[in-house]
Amino acid sequence: MKRKKEYRAVTFVLIALLALSAFVSGCTVRIVDDKDTEEPEYISEGDDSDVEITGYSTYSEEGSPYFLSKGYKVAVISPSALPSREQVDATVKGLEEWGFVPVEGKYVCPEVRTLDELLEDLKWALEDDEIKAVFCVRGGYGASQAMDVIPEDMIGKAHKPVIGYSDITIYHSAWTAAGLPSIHACMSSTFTSLPEECREAELKMMTGNIPSYRCQSKEAGIDGSAAGILIGGNLSTFTAVLNTGYDCTKTDEPYILFIEEVGENIQHIHRYLTVLKNAGVLDRAEGIVFGEWTELPADGSGNFGEVRGGEYESVADMIRREFLQDTDIPVAFGFPAGHADVNYPLLMGEEMELEVSGDTFTMDWVK
């Protein structure tokens, strides 16, 4: 009992000293009970655009088929972070329902995994001739470590598409650098929570039927038209490909840039865009399509607009004011692809035509 009284006395003295110090320095101290704290709130942008699929075009192929037919074997691997068993099971079941034959990688979801084991699954998926596509179960950090050691010619020799998004942006860049298309699309949640129209478009794209989109955005873009191969993906991940052996921005072909992000505040998004700006990636683009900004802090955390003449009203507002003042290329805001519940598939590494008029834009693949 004596020790408890001494402990309480010491605690009281410490709190009193802290309060006195704060009073002298003009600060305010607030003792917060963990039970009183609230969960942070988040907002998203670009996930509520109206999208119409205006038609499908068949991908023209020369030589051996690149896209899938029913009955083809598809590797189910996690070449980035580890998924749950439930995510893997949903992927396997969904691919079976689509008429494919999913084949799990040896190390798709153990409790722990080394980089060498990750690479073993990825190399198997690329080198096994019976495997016709690589379906990633999830993103998460890890893809850049793998691509840093994968031989540059392995992807070209494999001649098969990879499907995924988020950290799989690393692989999209590598496929584009190898001269091959890839599919930016939903992964395990394709079969659990993706809207039916998005899911149907993803299946069609995997079989070589490419959708054309007409979008009505909540944000007006910059008018114009452009054509070029589509590159990009998750913004923070995409910055990691710069100056690597799989840097798709080094292509000699004209390109249109697509980027989206999740969980970052406006300040961080500005920082990543500044990296792309300083590297010349934005200036070399023929056009830019901004996708979804998902789960941004709703309290304005990281909104540093007050030092530039007032707070930013949105991510789109920040981008216009900070990066598009002298831009004369077409720019579209709010294509619903990324980390929100709506995630339409995109064919990366192939030529696309972009037309922007006010808050309306179209995206058509021309091959």
Image (cartoon, helix red, strand yellow):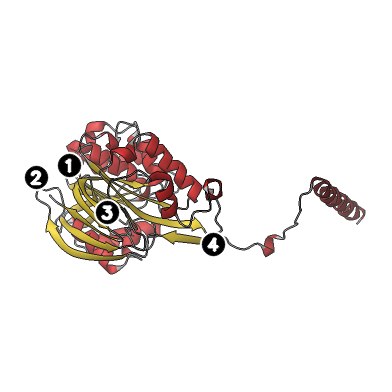
Give the secondary structure at mark 3: loop
Q: Tag 2 or tag 1, which sits nearer the N-term?
A: 2
Label annotation for residue 223: 3
In this view, the mark in front (4 or 2): 4
- Report whether residue 107 is seen: no
Give the secondary structure at mark 4: loop
Identify the image quadrant of the N terminus: bottom right
Residue type for callout 1: His
Tell me the residue that label 1 is attached to.
Answer: 159
In this view, the mark in front (3 or 2): 3
Residue 339, image x and y in percent? 39, 56
Label annotation for residue 41: 4
Q: Tag 2 or tag 3, which sits nearer the N-term?
A: 2
Label annotation for residue 102: none
Q: How many other residues sit within 10 Å of disc 1, few (<14), some (14-19) or many (≥20)?
A: many
Is the residue 23 above or below the residue 91 in the image?
A: above
Residue type for callout 3: Asp
Q: Tag 1 or tag 3, which sits nearer the N-term?
A: 1
Residue 341, image x and y in percent? 37, 63
C-beta proximity under 8 Å, tags 1 and 2: yes
Query: Mark 4 and mark 2: span between their CA atoms?
Result: 50 Å
Query: Mark 1 and mark 4: span between their CA atoms?
Result: 44 Å
Q: Tag 4 or tag 1, which sits nearer the N-term?
A: 4
The one of 349 and 226 positioned closer to us in this rendering: 226
C-beta proximity under 8 Å, tags 3 and 4: no
Residue type for callout 4: Glu
User: With 135 as the anchor, is 276 left or right in this view?
Assistant: right
Q: Which residue is drawn at 18% across and 36% down?
A: 157
The one of 298 and 77 positioned closer to us in this rendering: 298
